Amino acid sequence: MAKKSFRKTIIAVHRDTGYFFAGLTVLYAISGVAVNHMEDWNPNYTVAHVEHSVGDLVDVSDGGIAAEVLGRLGVEEEPKAAVRMSEKEFRIFLKNRTLYVATPSGQVVDELVSRRPGFFHVNYLHLNHAKGLWTWFADIYAVGLLVLALTGIFIITGKKGLGGRGRWLLIAGTAIPLIFLLLKT
């Protein structure tokens, strides 16, 4: 009777923990794939480049380039900073954009940055940029995944569980990351 009660408890704990963390697991899975491929794309922001010509800047001093360029583009925002990068390049930093100004030609590349909808927020949580209380919840989630893994191992019995193919799948799933670590470190 105790064996049946133990199995019922394991099944109930596995089911309820799984339901509780299912939504967060889906979000973390999406974010995990996104941040695993950061070399291919920016999972947090979209970056667009628009080219403009504001005309000749020959007679404009370094101190006046930012105001002149912003005025000619019709941008009313105050820059965070304006910096001469080299003899022929000037940068103007605004809230969500950077203007790359070629001097003295007045060619401008307007780099506009915006949060990638959905991904920014999910990655914010997954990478624990929220800190504080979120850290505690993320730790509880990690323990919840451990509970899911451990209870899941014991739900199925017999030849489909640890007494049969389940054992080999468990060994293979554990061996793959260990082998990878041995080869890469």
Image (cartoon, grey):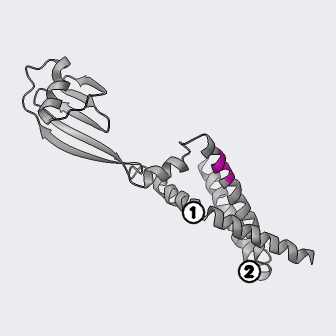
Select label 2 or label 1 by which is in front.
Answer: 1
Quarter of the view holding residue 168: bottom right
Toward the viewer: 183 or 74?
74
Percent position of residue 120, x then y = 44, 50
User: Main structural element of the magenta stretch: helix, strand or loop?
Assistant: helix
Mark 1 is surrounded, within 10 Å at the Cα level, by few (under 14), some (14 to 19) or many (20 or more) other residues, namely few
In this rendering, the answer to whether 102 lies above or below 152 is: above
Q: What mark, if any, has residue 160 been given in the picture?
A: 2
- Residue 18 seen in the current view: yes
Toward the viewer: 77 or 125?
77
| Residue corresponding to mark 1 | 23
* Quadrant of the frame with the N terminus: bottom right
Q: Residue at x 24, y 23 (%)?
A: 84
Mark 2 is surrounded, within 10 Å at the Cα level, by few (under 14), some (14 to 19) or many (20 or more) other residues, namely few
Q: Secondary structure under badge 2?
A: helix
Q: Provide the residue span drawn in magenta.
A: 136-140
Amino acid type for the residue under numbered disc 2: Lys
Q: Residue at x 49, y 60 (%)?
A: 30
In this rendering, the answer to whether 117 lies above or below 133 is: below
Q: Residue at x 41, y 48 (%)?
A: 44
Percent position of residue 18, x then y = 66, 66
Q: Is residue 43 left or right of residue 110?
A: right
Quarter of the view holding residue 93: top left
